[in-house]
Image (tube, rainbow, N blue to C red):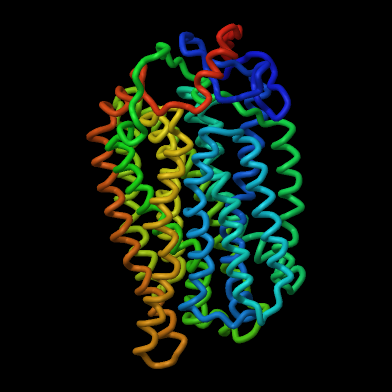
């Protein structure tokens, strides 16, 4: 269901007030928006999500050339992603707070300006100022935090029930698609121009289009607008900490395991595959740039294809299985992760023996990991009150990145460097060191599957609590919103 009401006023806010933080406390009808407008907004948010994740992994697609240009060793190269993620996670709670209380549309626009400006500036840094390149990646992470935190909550307020599941599936398809296209863009631009810098100069053009579309087509709906939420005026409300459920806690730990593995694989897999080809004698080592980016291109295409199939498969399985089992979402996540663990293990151990089998199992592992993106978002939206969703998204992002992909690229590179230091100086030993540093990912992903099994045990009770009226964290504009919207006429429209 999408909903329809009067057109948003200036700045994307609804109604005459333009406050955008409101829902009449006594009504059970959803806030409404024309279907074409809701779908156009979803399309724009998906496009920006695509660009967001292209920025996450464009560095990985050109990693060998960037390392050669700035003279960065493996033990420090992982810090590029760690700095990016750390800045993202530190700023995510700030953006979550702002998104729950102020204009989400304005916050999203600021985020796009931040990450596009920092990305463009990084292409002009000279090799003696490598620390500035690390700093620019941190600013890109800050901009990305605003989008990753707020965009899913906007979609949650535009769509409900099965329609929300489908829209979130499409939205989260662009995580693996954007990640894969980040590798593809980086390697393609490198091959065309012979200079990795142009990868960072193409992106701002695409992001300028995204900013214009965001301002023109995306509204800023009231929090919880698309849901029937009957709250009596003056009903006592609980604190945010009291509203946090065990389902949210366990699913967040499961997301953390996914983030750890995807962070390590996303950053190091192209180089791992490149070194595997060198070990098999299929290409010479890269001693100066530009390096052969064939493996980044292949891995990018693999990520796009498996991501699309995985997200659609996971969302559709969740939608169908929910009709017979209300615990479908965490059970699907658990099964996919517990199956992905042996696939990733086989992909790693078979790489020195046969590249084809390694690619097959790597593709299966990526597909199974991608099954979770839309499903975990649906879990969060179902167990967290609408007023708390921005903060909950920020908390999940923060925990997931602190314990997950903030450190996994650096830890993987560090372990590889330590193993290599105690071995003969050869390309084979370098490859084996990176391979063995990856093995911890298989154990982490299995632990993530266990966390989703625990989520399934608490899901139904926590969903029932989240649907109860008179709960939630107070909004700073509650009184003003009730006064301004008490007379607003709301009419629902079914698609």
Which residue is more in the foreground, 256 or 149? Answer: 149
Vertical placement of residue 148 versus 10, above or below: below
Which residue is more in the foreground, 279 or 460? Answer: 460
Which residue is more in the foreground, 414 or 311? Answer: 414
Percent from the top left, x then y, of residue 488? 60, 9
Vertical placement of residue 282 versus 460, above or below: below
Q: Residue at x 56, y 16 (%)?
A: 31
Which residue is more in the foreground, 309 or 393? Answer: 393
- Which of the 4 quarters of the picture holds residue 142? bottom right
Count how many numbered circles sit on residues in the image.
Answer: 0
Horizontal arrangement in the rendering, residue 94 relative to residue 128 (left or right): left
Percent from the top left, x then y, of residue 411? 39, 70
Horizontal arrangement in the rendering, residue 95 relative to residue 327 (left or right): right
Q: Residue at x 22, y 35 (%)?
A: 457
Vertical placement of residue 287 versus 439, above or below: below
Residue 452 appears anywhere in the view: yes
Percent from the top left, x then y, of residue 220? 62, 28
Horizontal arrangement in the rendering, residue 271 relative to residue 130 (left or right): left
Residue 34 appears anywhere in the view: no
Vertical placement of residue 262 versus 161, above or below: below
Q: Quadrant of the C terminus?
A: top right
- Which of the 4 quarters of the picture holds residue 324? top left
Q: Residue at x 48, y 27 (%)?
A: 475
């Amino acid at each position: 269901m999408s909903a329809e009401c009067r057109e948003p006023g200036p700045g994307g806010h609804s109604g005459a007030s333009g406050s955008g933080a409101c829902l009449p406390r006594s009504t059970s009808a959803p806030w409404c928006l024309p279907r074409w407008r809701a779908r156009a907004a979803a399309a724009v948010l998906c496009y920006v999500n695509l660009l967001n994740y292209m920025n996450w992994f464009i560095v990985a697609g050109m990693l060998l050339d960037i390392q050669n240009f700035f003279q960065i060793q493996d033990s420090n190269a992982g810090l590029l992603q760690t700095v990016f993620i750390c800045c993202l996670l530190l700023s995510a709670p700030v953006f979550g707070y702002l998104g729950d209380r102020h204009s989400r549309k304005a916050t999203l626009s600021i985020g796009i300006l931040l990450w596009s400006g920092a990305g463009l500036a990084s292409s002009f840094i000279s090799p003696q100022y490598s620390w500035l390149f690390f700093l620019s990646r941190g600013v890109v992470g800050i901009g990305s935090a605003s989008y990753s935190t707020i965009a899913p909550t906007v979609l949650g307020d535009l769509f409900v029930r099965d329609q929300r599941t489908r829209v979130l599936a499409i939205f989260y398809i662009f995580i693996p698609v954007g990640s894969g296209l980040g590798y593809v863009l980086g390697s393609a631009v490198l091959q065309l121009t012979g200079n990795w810098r142009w990868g960072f100069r193409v992106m701002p053009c695409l992001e300028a289009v995204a900013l214009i579309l965001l301002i023109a087509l995306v509204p800023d709906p009231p929090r919880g607008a698309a849901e029937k939420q009957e709250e009596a005026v003056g009903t006592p409300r609980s604190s945010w900490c009291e509203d946090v459920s065990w389902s949210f806690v366990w699913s967040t730990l499961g997301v953390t395991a996914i983030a750890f593995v995807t962070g390590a694989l996303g950053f190091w897999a192209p180089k791992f595959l490149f070194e595997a080809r060198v070990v098999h004698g299929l290409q010479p080592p890269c001693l100066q740039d530009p390096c052969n980016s064939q493996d980044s291109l292949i891995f990018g295409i693999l990520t796009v294809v498996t991501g699309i199939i995985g997200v659609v498969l996971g969302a559709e399985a969740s939608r169908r299985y929910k009709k017979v089992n209300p615990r479908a979402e965490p059970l699907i996540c658990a099964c996919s992760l517990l199956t992905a663990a042996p696939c990733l293990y086989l992909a790693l151990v078979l790489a020195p023996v046969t590249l084809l089998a390694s690619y097959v199992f790597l593709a299966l592992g990526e597909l199974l990991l991608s099954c979770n993106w839309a499903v975990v978002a649906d879990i969060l939206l179902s167990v967290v009150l609408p007023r708390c969703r921005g903060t909950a998204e920020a908390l999940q992002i923060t925990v997931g990145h602190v314990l997950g992909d903030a450190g996994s690229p650096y830890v993987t590179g560090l372990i590889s460097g330590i193993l290599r230091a105690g071995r003969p100086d050869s390309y084979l030993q370098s490859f084996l060191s990176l391979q063995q540093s990856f093995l911890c990912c298989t154990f982490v992903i299995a632990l993530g599957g266990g966390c989703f099994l625990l989520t399934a045990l608490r899901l139904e009770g926590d969903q029932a609590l989240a649907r109860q009226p008179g709960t939630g964290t107070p909004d700073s504009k509650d009184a003003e919103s009730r006064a301004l919207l008490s007379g607003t006429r709301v009419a629902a429209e079914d698609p």
